[in-house]
Structure formats: C-alpha cells, structure tokens
Amino acid sequence: MNESIYKGSDVITRYPEVILSKDDVPYESNLTFNAGIVKEKDGYLMLFRNDYGCTQPEWEAGKRFKGTNIGLARSRDGIRWTVDPEPSFELKQLRNEEFVRCYDPRITAMDGHYYVCFAVDTKHGVHGGICVTDDFKTYDILSISVPDNRNMVLFPEKINGKYVRLERPMPVYSRDGKDLFDIWISESPDLVYWGNSKLVLATEDVPYCNDKIGPGAPPLKTDKGWLVIFHAVDIDPTRGKNGWENYWRKRYCIGVMLLDLEDPSKVIGMSKKPLMIPEAPYELEGGFRNNALFPCGMVRDDEGLIRIYYSAGDAVVRMATAKEEDLIALCCEKRK
Ligand code: BMA
C-alpha cells in the first residue's frame, strides 16, 4: 500500500479520555468495544460488546474467551457512562441452538422502538440479525440473514416507504478467495423480508483498502445526504505480533461517504483519504488487536457536533468529534 495516503483527517478531534473500559463493568469483563449508541432527548444509551473470561497472558497461553454478551450503559452527556448491573442481551434469551455468539450491536431508534442490528456466529456461518426491544431486557428477533453477512446498520427512517439497511456480505468464491468484501444495501417492507439488494461501495473504490470494508454506524441524515462512516482494512503480510495476537496483519481505518437522501444506493461522494487511521498511542498499543479502529456509533450532540464512537484495539470504547460541514466537505472534495 502507498503509505503516504495513511494520514488521518485534521477535521477530527479525539476525546482524550477512554469512554468505556472493562473497569466500568460490574460483571465479568475483559474487553468492552464495538458499541452502538443512540442519543435521546435527555441522554445517551450504549450497547457494547463484552468479551469475558480470558486475560492477555491466558490468551497467549492458548485459552480463549468464556463468552461474549452485550452490555447496556447510560449517560447524561455521552462521556461519563454507568453500566447496568447485568448484561442486557445474552445468547440464552434467543433460544436458538445454532447460535454460538452475538456481537457488534448497532442501535437505531425509530417509530418509538429500539432496533438492534448484530452479528451472530452460528454452527453454520456468520449471520446479520435485526431485533427489536423497548426496554433492553426483552428482545424479539425480526430477521436473521443467510450466511455470511454482518456489519448491518439500519437507516433511522423509511425511505420511499421501505426500511433500508446497509450490510456487508462476505463473498469468497466470486472474489478470488480473498476478503474483498463490499458494502451493500437492501430494503424491506416490514424489517423481516429483505431484498432488492444493490452494491453501494466496493473495496476497490477505497484507495486506502486492499482487503474489506463494512458499514460502521447507522447513517445520519443531513441536508446534503446520508452521512455514513465505514471501516476499511488493509493487510500487510509483514506485520507481526500486535496486542494479544501472535500476528495481526490488518489495519482498520475509518472512512466517510455521503449517500443520496432519496436513493441511498447512490454514493454522492466519498473522502479519498481515511477519516481516521490508528495513530494515537492508545490506538497503536495496549489493545487486544492494535491498529484497529472500529466505529459502531455516530450521533449529533446538543451542540450540533458529530460524535463518532469507535473501538480502539478491540479493547475500549473511545470517541472523536467533527463538524458536520467538514465531514460533508470531505465527501464532496474533488480528487486532487
Ligand atoms: C472484524 C470483527 C469485529 C472486530 C474487527 C477488528 O472482523 O470481528 O468484531 O472488531 O474485526 O478485530
């Protein structure tokens, strides 16, 4: 890869403190990351992935996590969070023998309900699921995709009478056996049956990616279009041990694009450079898998700033902010 392209954008300001770590969790926890966020009138809600039952030395000795559950945290300001005493979402609630692990929740508030998109590993593949909850205690599953798919995000309103989601299927045969996974869009009359799927953004459209991309947070509506952040991965076979893993060859950057308000399968524009790359010291070390920024939440705060909630190193939740007009301008810049 051409390393000169790997500069984070100066429109981004990183919040200096950790937003959520294992130390904030009142039950067993080792890694807290990939958090979906919604902003309410009087505060914020977060669903986060909680991997538990393994420490770094144990991992390096061959042990693996006991499990993953989904925690709920609440906050007045989106900065200081209180985690509920028990996990919000556990596999056993789903009563499905096939399911091995649910993770990476993204929340969309719509029609007075909370819709949660999640990934689920099963005995027969990885699926994307959508469930609905009103209280974060009882979840009803609305749809589970065929394998292999994940990184689903639901738009916060119907478009032309249909629910719409972005998603990231994982074709292998047709993409040379490589991880060249792209961002797709599908629509549904009822959140159960999904179809009319179209390719939105391909890996080869993203100059700083030689591997896969995937939607990050649910799209945010602006006057100019749907603002969408996504992760973009490049692989370098020379990368070695990084974090807990014996080798970790991937770097996860964050990209930004703008989709048409009326027809979100159309990309109005995309920043040709990464919005964020792993560059802060806490993004380059101290994580489970360093060099990985993974956004699952994006909201407009009370001051009108855009907040991007992302994981650093698959270990903690962090936050960065940017002005809406700057993000839109990046998407609309002509290629230099
Ligand atoms: C992806 C998913 C995410 C994870 C990311 C970085 O493939 O597994 O859950 O955060 O890799 O490791």
Image: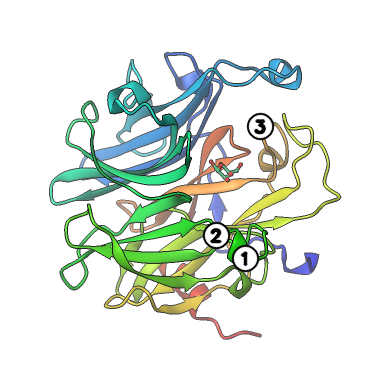
Find the distance from the CA under tag 1 to the CA under tag 3.
29 Å
Residue tagged by mark 2? 171
48 is higher (above) or lower (below) than 118: above
Image x and y of residue 218, in percent = 36, 55
- Amino acid bearing label 2: Pro
Image location of residue 70, percent across then percent down? 39, 29
Residue 119, numbered label: none
Residue under circle 3? Answer: 288
Residue 56 figure quarter: top right
Residue 50 lies, in percent from the top left, at 47, 27
Tell which quarter ligand 1 is in: top right
> Can you give x and y, in whole percent of width and height, for residue 66 in the image?
54, 17
Left or right position of 320 against 88:
right
For disc 3, the neighbor class at 10 Å (few under 14, some 14 to 19, many from 20) is many
- On residue 175, the disc is 1
* Element type where label 1 sits in the image: helix
Question: Could you give the CA–CA distance between mark 1 and mark 2, rounded to whole angstroms?
Answer: 6 Å
